Amino acid sequence: MKRMKALLVLIILGVGTAWAAGPHIGYLYPAGGQTGTTVRITAGGQGLRGAKDVYVSGEGITAGMVEYQGQVKKLNQDQKRMLGQEVRYLRQKKMAALYGRKPPKRPQPKPDEEAADSKPVELPDHPLLDNLDKLTIEGLDHVIDEFVRPSVLQINPQIAETVVLELVIDPNAAPGPREIRLVTNAGLSNPLVFEIGTLPEVCEPELSDPGKIVTTNVELPVLINGQILPGEIDRFRFTAEKGQNLVIETQARKLIPYLGDAVPGWFQATVRLLDGQGRETAFADDWRFDPDPVLCYEIPKSGDYVLEINDAIYRGREDFVYRVSIAEKPFVTSIFPLGTPRGKTTKAAVSGWNLDGSEIVLDGRLKAAGIRQAVLTQNGLASNPAAYAVDAWEECGESEANDTPQQAQPIDLPRIVNGRIEKAGDRDCFRFEGKAGQSVVAEVAARRLHSPLDSLLYLTDAEGAVIEWNDDSADRNTGLETHHADSRLSVTLPRDGTYCVQVSDTRSHGGEAYGYRLHVGPPRPDFELYVTPSSLNLSTGRTEAVTVHAIRKDGFDGEIEIAFKDAPKGFQLGGGRIPPGVDTIRMTVTAPQQPINQPTALHLQGTGRIDGKAVTRPVTAAEDMMQAFIYRHLVGMQELAVFAPRNRQFIPFDEKPAAPIQIPAGGTARVQIRIPNRPAYENLQLELNEPPAGLRLEDVIVRGGRLAFTVTADGKEAPAGLTDNLIVDAYAMVPQKNKEGQPTGKTNKVSYGVLPAIPFEITNAQAKP
Amino acid sequence: MQQQKRFEPSRRDVLKWGLAGLAGSTALPGRLWAQAGDQAAPPTKKRGPAKSVIEIWMWGGPSHVDTFDPKPEAGADYTGPLNKPIETNVDGIRIGQMLPMLAQQAHRYSIIRSMTHGINGHETAAYMMQTGRSAGERLVYPSVGAVVSLFKGVDHGYEGLVPPYIVLTQSIGRFSEVGFLGPRYKPFVTGGDPSRTPFAVEGIVAEGITEKRQRDRRELLGTLDTLGKAMEGSPAFAKFDACEESAYNLILGDAGKLFDLGQETSERRDRYGRNRFGQSCLMARRLVEQGVPYIMINYGGWDTHKQHFEIMNRKLPEFDRGFSALLEDLDEKGLLDSTVVWCSGEFGRTPKVMWEEPWNGGRGHYGPCFSAVVAGGGFKGGCVVGASDKVGAEPVERPVTPQDLIGSLYRLMGIDPAGPLPNPRGMELQVLPKASEGGILKEIMQTGATV
């Protein structure tokens, strides 16, 4: 996770130690808008002071800042006292009315409060404080919790600051998710999803009284934007006609995938549909394994219906944001097959709601292998995206009956079988001829293609003896998949003969939607690459660190060279090599010395050698997100956005990245870097930033345009063979001056970013005494 | 930020550390306990088994680097503002700067700085620390308290006023203390708050009800008990009447007085701290005086993902006062030799401060390395067992597992960790799995302390 030093100084507990934090947005509300409209949205976050611009990915949206609202909930003592008195009085008044008692007297200001020179106490402009006298008792309690007693409740500074933005959405803007980042004086924020839709949109009424359940009337079709606060249930009444096939589709986790400080680690929305008599007619708390609920419901009788939405365990907070659509819109529940060969198109059978046809085109032309999405559009309304795979191997369909090893369908390797567990308890068997010592990988792709199949995979020999089996393969914790269930096994065949691969569902479920793609063939060494964070805050000439993650597949263990692709002139990558066998490494990006005043997308790619051929893969920008206090996920973003305004605090490095420095195990290496000969650099200090164990930096000398230091490797903790990049913080301790320019005796730590990454290798060479 | 790393020592690691620890204890006898100085390890004498255990359960997981394993050299990213540890009254032992009173009691306790189980989830880690067993086995094993209650409770001659396993004041929750042993060995959870008067102990001391009113109520109940009168002589009712009599003896007899902290001097109550934790420590000492075998002080509030240092500012002084007073008081009353005191959470906290949002200066769960403190009952004082690395992230010397710690405690209580564990199903089970001699904390046990 990013943490930029020397941008914003945070004094903790008055001890004078400085830590820094970059701008961060925790929610957008509303988290989307309709094409052809102008919407005002609130962004809640931290470190947003000085927000001055908005960066939206993609085309067709013009965005601008309206105002920074700060932490409106932070009241001073006078405001707290006054609000407390008022709420106490209103509470007593309501209690008196409830029990038929005499109403209390409004408290009078004390004499010292009436003094002519005392300033009137004003409460901040906040919807919760606008109509205190109309709140219920629970609503008044909520006001106290929010404004007067925040110190005894969970404080959420990460979403306490708010800014208001205005977005003009072009009528032709492509529907779908975009990313919004804020530009502040302290840099570029993280991205959050903003959805462009085509349905008419409404927002739930402003939070006036969370203690009261309010039912809001809406007209279909509609997309409702809302926020859930603690204990809150949002209700919407609409009129529907008999026979309407309504699709009620919720977006909650899709908008804010993971909450680090919540269990479950996201807003787990539930939706409930009530009829005119208040009876529950339908309920959903998910869509198969996707936590965002979907209800497909045929209206049995014309009349009024009410939709309720809340958190499954009645939590809530400003970042519990949702979008829920109610419309007769197309909704795909399954497609078959779940993929197409690369270079071809396939017409897949499609099932779902409000679909005119029964086919969907899976386009594999001009697309690299991987997972793609297909969307059906009917009456101007787009369906949910259907995931499908594009692959290079030859494909075949499953032929029933193949339920037993004796009935196994013969296949040649390598092969992709498009199959389906058609009914509960079904099992699909495929046989192939193998040779002793042959490496075979069998892998099911189902869950990642939105199939509900929880696959179970067996490989047996001709006699039925189990050679290998697998339920779930390693969960790589990437993306939004939290119910990983696809199987994979890898074996070396023990002898020549016939082998059988068997696919079934772990829970013995089955049905039309239980499709899968079974890959059987030799290992396919490959890799995926991610870079975090997805917002890179630089300034002219400055260097900062990024982390590149390699997801290695089928035994690929080679080195990967990372490079820019079509980068603006002047960008440099330091330490852009992932050594063999390494999965995660930090490297550096240096900005050009000309400013980049608008956030810009930067592209990286990685090249490795597989079977003697150079294979290049894109590096996907990602955020390293935590959920439920522990689990981490790499969540892919649309782009790596970089921002590099003018700043003088940098060191221009002219030298190209050098070959790895060689450090003898238990010994030292001297590093020299040429820098401009300027007085400002004479007090430079260096510090290793999250170094590998056993390495330390010492003997820093800055002289005559040379920066030199020694790296020492502990013989035990940093053994021979270790290769990595050193990331080195550069800073100067600058004497602090008061307003009159006089020294205060204190110093400020001024960061110069980091040095370009220094690749190193611990060697077996004899350490010099 | 620092990645939370799951740390699971391999058998090879454990063997390596074990040998290293053994080598260290042989070749460098000073390394482990010469630090104790003159005040540590009183002259050897023949001891019997410890009689009671007080467990201070720091639910949520306290930061080891802010308490008993400070790392000022690791820099501000690790220490936050707590970067000035203090010397204790035992040469060479430093502890966190917020624990000055405990610093003066270091000769009475030993610190284990190499606790490890590698689990970062509350429930699983708590299960391991409370049972000495790995989670995920087929059976749900009983906690230390339930096992002590089994071996030292009413089945083995305990005739105390109150049940043999007491929890002050709230149940751990999300955890079954008794496992398969069943309700007979369940703890008695007091409820209430001992820092308030009266200490409203669940079912024993009722707030706002005098003893006379309690007697009047019983009499009224008896008058209304028409069924009981109609069924006079029924064995079932006789049993019920006996239970009722015991219950009223608890409420109206000496047990009520046992929980009356007003019988302590005001100075003593102040010394412990006039808060729930401090008065729970005092209550624990009173229970030890009554011979209660196992007392747990469930001391929550250590799960400091956010506002960590603000919470440390509030909690550590309270902890320092209460725990130090308990050790001092037990010793002064001659009870420390027969009372094991142990103090730990289910894990430690990330050595590196999480400055980023949403934590804003918090610490996360951390099971790969943390600290525990033991005192009394045959444990030596003034010692440090094991060591963590430069930042407190991994044990580098003498890793201690929950099984080692609990096994040592059992030894001091006269319970054989390798002995059979009676259970309702009649299964052949051991008190602890494969209790290893190498793991037992012999280096900090008084000679002759184990049975």
Image (cartoon, coloured by chain):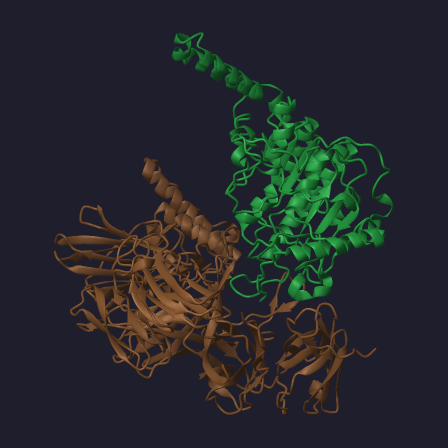
Chain colours: A brown, B green
Q: Is residue B373 left or right of residue B143?
A: right
Residue A738 in view: no
Horizontal side of A692 relative to A489 (left or right) equals right
The number of numbered discs placed on residues in the rendered structure image is 0
In the rendered image, the residue lying farthest to the front is A496
Residue A612, percent from left and from top: 51, 84
Is residue B346 at all visible to an observer of this figure?
yes
**Quarter of the rendering containing residue B305:** bottom right
Residue drawn at x 70%, y 54% as measured from the top left = B15
Q: Nearer the viewer, residue A419 or B342?
A: A419
| Horizontal relation, residue A290 to residue A747: left or right | left
Q: Indicate whether A644 appears above or below B155.
A: below
- List x then y, in percent, for residue A399: 26, 65
Q: Is residue B281 left or right of residue A135?
A: right
Q: Quadrant of the C terminus of chain A?
A: bottom right
Does B230 appear above or below B412?
above
The quarter of the picture where residue A679 lies is bottom right
Residue in front for this viewpoint, A428 or B6 = A428
Q: Depth check: give the residue in front, A291 or A48.
A: A291
Q: Which residue sits at x=37%, y=80%?
A: A368
Q: Position of residue A260 (x, y in %)?
A: 48, 60
In this view, A188 is above or below B190? below
Residue A680: x and y in percent read: 69, 86
Q: Who's the residue at 84% across and 34% down the image?
A: B45
